[in-house]
Amino acid sequence: MSNESENDLNSDVLRLYSSSGHEFVLSRKMSYVSGTIKSMLNADNSNFMEDKLSEIKFREISTPVLEKVIQYFYFKNKYTNSTSDLPEFQINEKIVVDLLLSAHFLDT
Amino acid sequence: MMNNQSASPSSKPNSNRIAFKHFNQGVQIDPDYPKRTWRLLKTAIREIHRQNSSVLSFEELYRNAYNMVLHKYGEILYNKLKKMVDKHLKSVASNVASSVDEYFLVELNKSWIDHKTSMLMIRDILMYMDKTFLEKNKVPTVFEMGLHLFRDNIARSSQIKDRLLKTLLSMVQKERAGEVIDRILIKNITQMLIDLGVNSKTVYVEDFEKPLLSTTSSFYQGESQAFITTCSCPDYMKKVEICLKEELERVSHYLDSSSEVKLKEVCERQLITNHMKTLIEMENSGLISMLKDDKVEDLKRMYNLFNRVSDGLNTMKNVISEYVREIGRDIVSDEEKAKEEGTYFQSLLDLKDKYDRLLLQAFNNDKQFIHSIHQAFEYFINLNPKSPEFISLFIDEKLKKGLKGVSDEEIDVILDKILTLFRFIQEKDVFEKYYKQHLAKRLLLGRSVSDDAERTMIAKLKTECGYQFTSKLEGMFTDMKLSVDTMTGFRNRLQETKKTLPIDLNVHVLTTGFWPTQNTANCILPREILQCCETFKSYYLSNHNGRLLLWQTNMGTAEIKANFPSKTHELQVSSYQMVILVHFNDSEKLTFKEITDLTGIPQQDLKRNLQALTNPKNKILEKESQTKTIEESDVFSFNQKFKSKLFRVKVMAVVQKETNVEASETRQKVDEDRKHQIEASIVRVMKARKTMEHSNLVSEVMKQLQSRFIPNPIIVKKRIESLIEREYLERSKQDRKIYNYMA
């Protein structure tokens, strides 16, 4: 993983699309919080479309949920192995259920 | 999974349930759903098998598979996948099987790599199934299933399995014959076999390793047969070393490391174990001749090789020990005839040196070897009952002249070496007897080269055998020192009283018990000397009242002036010789008989001393008959023609070889001493234990005395009986075998 990020810093950009077509741009590394995304992009010898294009279209994830998911990626990355106190991760009650389902889907 | 509690939405279980219900209901309406989804996945997998995955959307496939499993179609998905991969592999198998020999392995390897890749991809897509469905249903994961299918369809298919094995074995064979082969390819294939075993190595072991071992075994059986008939032992061993090294390299290059032990064992059995005897006994180059010729390198090689197999060193050890015994026996019995004590012992020392060196350089100082060689030495040294005497004589020799101009360290080394041999001697008390005699002679005749060396030797004996052993020897040294003091006192007294003695007298006062007791057959001393002796005696007894002073004339030395027609010489002679010569002052000729009567010297000693005086080198007396030995009929006269370049003439005492009579005397003394020691030991034991059973007592006594000599049980028994007679012990009334101590 570290190899990859060193080798092609340019391709360390990942685009995620929500079901309604909203584009989110983030670092690949951040997305590895999701087991699903990680294997989509990082499987040693496969190269699926997603890996080639560095973009993933989530047909079943809505914009607010995907946004929250990406927020969580950054949240997780920031506080994993950190010694500072853990702030609360704010979640809008309306999207709780969908977020849960998406989290399951994404293996997060 | 979200593992962050505060952030996880799962803290609201209520809404969860509702959501799932709703979600499920939505899709279950469509009865065609599983079929449709499978079709989609099937096409995708086909693409993957074609290595065409880049057109596929992982998200789509994953989502579909995810949903399928979520809606309890996992089993259908799993089985369909299995069938599909199975079918695919069957076609791959026929493809591999149809390839020509050279490309067979390459093709196989390629299909293996492809299969692995596709299975990994499929696994990723079906990740959700692996996670949820399999756990519940206890079936192998997708990837493992792929391995099983590959194993059954390809690696173990009838078309491929045997061919694969044959090809691999022929590759190994080719390499053994010196050809270069594609090691990496073979490494990959063996790795494949290992992977196919999933979590064990059964596939590798069953399909490849076992046949490999058996071919290896038969290969080296043939090879070793060929080697052993054509090569000498060292050459054979070199070959074996190379073979073993090659096999090990083979393991590291393309076999699994678990094979190393097994392969090694097979090779070692064929190359070493099966030929051990032949190798050792090989004529002109086997173990014995290596020992004979000091082939350190070869011996080391043999040791290292034999060390690999069980019982190898044992066999080797036994042969060496047997050989050492044989050589030792030869030395011991052969040199005895030659009666050359010095060389006898020197050759033993050389032998010991040689084997110590071999042990160090070739045998890695192996404890077993050291032990067995020591045992061999112990065995043959004790074969010769004269060994204790010879050791003492050897030390005597060294201390008398052998150590001149040798540094202290070297003396130390030599003495240490002697001690190592001394350790093997069982009859240490016999040694003590002789050592005492020899030491006494050295001290009294002033023959010892270095006082320090003497003391080091005694210190060494002390550490070896304990205080008791050397206390008397040390007493002898003390006597010598006291005598010097006594003599200064005596001389001072003479000056004070203005007395002068006709001769310069030097007396050593020796404590009885410390010194070897000699038969005090006194000779008749000349008047002048007697007078001196009396003076000394009165002086000594005035200082030490109540002591008994006896003169040991057989141990003294004298310096006398002799006027020969040519020149005046000073003769250094023993007291006996002096006594004999003094009588020639009065008469020209004396017969043997007359000398005996005049001097009173015992015949044995007289003969010995006359021999020394008539010795062609320093011919002080003329003997009428020409025989070499002294006969009782001989007549002696003063040799007028005596000539010597030196002013001082040292008359060499004839080396006193122990006569048979003396030897048996010494023996008797030793036996007598032993009796006391045994009795003392018995009493010691019994005093501590009060009651004891016969055999226990005997073994305890043996243990106590071991360091000095090995007592004969029969003698021990006799001593016990004698102690019972003298009422130190009694037999128990209940059991005749048990003794009680009587205080």
Image (tube, coloured by chain):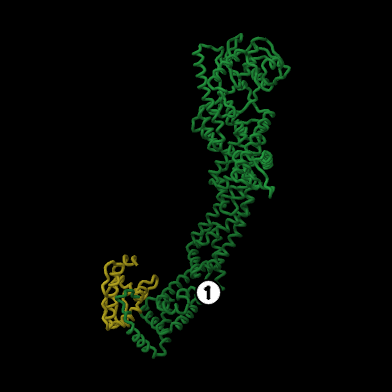
Q: Is residue B497 left or right of residue B667?
A: left
Question: From the viewer's perspective, is residue B37 above or below residue B170?
Answer: below
Query: Considering the numbered disc 1 on the image, is that residue within a helix, a strand or a loop?
Result: helix
As drawn, A27 above or below B594: below
**Residue A27, position as x, y percentages in the image:** 29, 71
Q: Is residue B697 left or right of residue B145?
A: right
> What letter labels the chain drawn in green?
B
Which residue is identified by label 1? B152
- Under mark 1, the amino acid is Asp
Classed neighbour count for the residue bearing mark 1: other residues with Cα under 10 Å, few (<14), some (14–19), many (≥20): some
* Residue in front for this viewpoint, B699 or B286: B699
Toward the top, the furthest residue is B565
Residue B651: quadrant of the picture:
top right
The colour applied to the residues of chain A in this rendering is: yellow
Percent position (x, y) of residue A37?
34, 75
Rendering coords of residue B230 (x, y %): 63, 50
Q: Nearer the viewer, residue B54 or A46?
A: A46
Depth order, front residue of B182/B412: B412
Quadrant of the rendering where the C terminus of chain B is positioned: top right
On what subunit does the disc labeled 1 rest?
A: B
Residue B528, quarter of the rendered image: top right
Residue at the image point whose x is 40% and y is 81% from the top: B65
Q: How many marks?
A: 1
In the displayed structure, B606 sits above or below B415; it is above
Give the quarter of the image for residue B706: top right
Q: Position of residue B485 (x, y in %)?
A: 50, 22
Residue at the (56%, 20%) spot, across then down: B541
| Direction right: furthest residue | B633
Q: Residue at x 69, y 28 (%)?
A: B661
Q: Quadrant of the N terminus of chain B?
A: bottom left
Q: Nearer the viewer, residue B121 or B379?
A: B379
Does any portion of residue B324 appear in the rendered image?
no
